Amino acid sequence: MRFAFAVTLACAAAFLGACSGGTSSFYPAAPDAASLAPGQMSVSVEAQAPFDFAAHQYNVVFNTSGNGSTPASDRSQPNWSAYSYALIAGGDGKTTAGPVAFVRGRGAHAPAIVPLQAKPSQFVFDPNSDETGNEYRITFARSLLGRGGALPHVGNLWRFNVIVSKPNLHDAGFSYVSGIAPCRACFVSPKLDVTQPFDVVEYVRLAPRTGDPSTQIVRVEIANRP
């Protein structure tokens, strides 16, 4: 199965910061991190309304290269240099999730999006972690990422973003919906040092907006246990 992003129209539905900024809280030792097994990370994503996994694709994108860039939702990063891996939920008409890698060839072409194989113990998807439908949680083994070959490098300092896209599992390219404005300054990811336990929470300050509230991300929490 091959994945592609078609980013939703305008800033109203797209990504952390959402053209209105966000605030971070960083907790070096938190209960969520302590509850994880060694080598695990968890990601909780909350929306303004229950998620619609059939109509939308929710993408937690990591930059594990160590180059310090936050994954952008526009075409501003040459050769998708801040895209290393993603945890993709929905987008196939079903309530499913899985990890993928962004494998680059030569030149400035869009990378191939390669699904990663995971055992049930290595990747756990809870589509209703708050029992209201407004939050989902993924717990995964970091060892899934960077297991040799042509897969992207995995360093110790990660950056992230959350991007909502239209479901598209057949087109191998990144076909953006016209009208989205560059928004590189909207969200700058904190550094995630995966050699340390942490629990980072990003709250998105919502500006007045219209559109589908199930695409409007309001909070993301990432916990890690070395």
Image (cartoon, grey):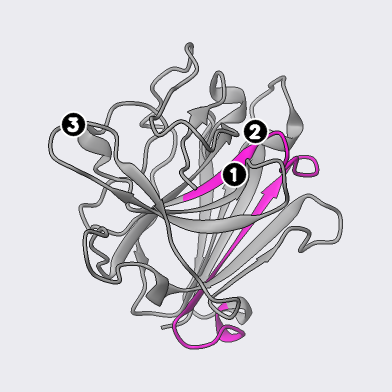
Badge 3 amino acid = Ala
Residue 13 location (% of width, % of height): 61, 28
Amino acid tagged 2: Leu
Q: Which of the numbered marks, if any, corresponds to residue 169?
A: none
Tell whether position 159 is magenta: no
Q: Residue at x 50, y 28 (%)?
A: 6
Question: Which residues fall within the magenta stretch?
Answer: 33-60
Determine the residue positioned at 71% across, 41% down.
93
Tell me the element at label 3.
loop
Q: Nearer the viewer, residue 140 or 223?
A: 140
Q: CA distance from mark 3 to mark 2?
A: 34 Å
Instruction: For the residues labelled 3 and 2, say whether their Cβ atoms are less than 8 Å apart.
Output: no
**What residue is pinned by disc 2?**
206
The quadrant in which residue 30 appears is: bottom right
Residue 39 drawn in magenta? yes
x, y (%) of residue 56?
66, 36
Q: Is residue 61 above or below residue 182?
A: below
Outermost residue to the top: 179
In terms of depth relative to the viewer, which is nearer, 155 or 199? 155
Query: Which of the two discs, 1 and 2, labels the residue nearer the N terminus?
Result: 1
Which quadrant of the view contains residue 149? bottom left
Which residue in the structure is indicated by mark 3?
A: 108
